[in-house]
Amino acid sequence: MGKLKTAFVLLAIFSHQVNADCGCNKLDRDASVAERVDELPAQQVCQQQARNKNKHYRDYYPEETEEEIEGMSLIPGGSQYIGTDEPHFMADHESPERLVKLNDFYLDKYEVSNANFAKFVEATNYTTEAERFGDSFIFKTLLKPEQQEKLKDYRVANAVWWYKVSGVSWRRPNGIDSNLEGLEHHPVVHVSWRDAVAYCEWAGKRLPSEAEWEVACRGGKQRKLFPWGNKLMPKDKHWLNIWQGDFPDGNTEEDGYPFTCPVDQFRQNNYDLYNIVGNVWEWTADLWQAGDTSPSPNRVKKGGSYLCHKSYCYRYRCAARSQNTEDSSAGNLGFRCAKDV
């Protein structure tokens, strides 16, 4: 009997290590409550570094004709690696590492903020899907104990720290009694993929492809875990907004934030991108499964969020990926825009 009990314990530990995540890929509307080369030319990276160090880089690169766009970084294309041959989550299809060819493109330096999304809504009278459905998902720590008890039947079955709460939307991101006061420069959340596409079209932009997003995330570096390198905390400083402590209880908030942080808080790579990992997940244009023609297919999201931790949801790596259905929304899911050159 003792051996059988031990076997069950080991199986449970193994299953946790294989399948552990924060559960935000389960927050769907219908959820129950090329030839390989060894090195790439360094010229693209050097040019981008020079541009970011000197706003008058065209004095040194007169052949460049791309215009500068306020609030966006010019990301050099060419042949770039994405993916990894050392995947952490096999089910997420992080592997294999592969070579892609991209054109130059622009990417927002920051995640779309509440203030900017409010301008879009005011100009278009847009209603988000969360507002039309009448609810969205928020994390347990944003609910008082009595609220958690009252809403216990509205928890996600396989991620009971997530609650579907009526009245929550981008206007009330942290609960029905919350508002946007003091959060104007935090990323907009509770926006579906379709909401993000609508905003991008209004702004004359688009969502980035997964490949574009990952190339931008890597900041010109090859085979690194994070936008800045392989060490999580170079010089013992926090470089991103993620969970510290034991998940899902006991966030020590060592990075200074219990939930989202301002979109301009953490500069993370040579492309002058902020919060490209951590803070909130970011929608991309790509289908999770190519050819999916279902009414609300899964779309790829990247970057992880303030709820990620290495021990449970190690998805704030450049190669990491996850998914949600197009109509899904949650308190840790936002986006940034791209634009063709």
Image: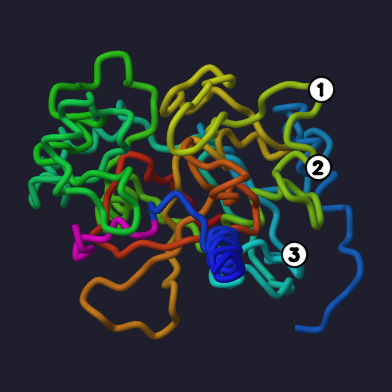
**Disc 2 element:** loop
Would you say 296 lies left or right of 258 here? left
Task: Please name the residue that numbered disc 3 is placed on.
Answer: 80
Task: Please name the residue that numbered disc 1 is placed on.
Answer: 235
Residue 106's spot in the image, x, y percent? 56, 49
Decide which of tag 1 and tag 3 comes sooner along the chain: 3
Which residue does the image show at 69% across and 71% down from the upper left?
101
Which residue does the image show at 39% across and 26% down from the upper left?
186
Examine the rendering and report whether any part of residue 125 can be seen. Answer: yes
Q: Which residues are magenta?
A: 25-33
**102 vs 244: above or below:** below
111 or 75: which is nearer to us? 111
Q: Badge 1, how many Cα within 10 Å: few under 14, some, many 20+?
A: few
Query: In front of the other: label 3 or label 2?
Result: 3
Q: Badge 3, how many Cα within 10 Å: few under 14, some, many 20+?
A: many
Residue type at numbered disc 2:
Tyr
Work out how far the residue at label 1 is from the one at label 3, CA to CA, in angstroms.
Answer: 28 Å
Q: Badge 2, how many Cα within 10 Å: few under 14, some, many 20+?
A: few
- Helix, strand or loop: magenta stretch: loop
Residue type at numbered disc 3:
Gln
Which residue does the image show at 20% across and 34% down from the upper left?
148
Work out how far the residue at label 2 is from the one at label 1, CA to CA, in angstroms.
Answer: 33 Å
Query: In front of the other: label 2 or label 1?
Result: 1
Which residue does the image show at 56% across and 29% down from the upper left?
245
Task: Please name the residue that numbered disc 2 is placed on.
Answer: 61
Decide which of tag 2 and tag 1 comes sooner along the chain: 2
What is the basis of the colouring in this image? rainbow
**314 vs 98: above or below:** above
Find residue 149 and report its image quarter.
Answer: top left
Q: Which labelled disc corresponds to residue 17?
A: none
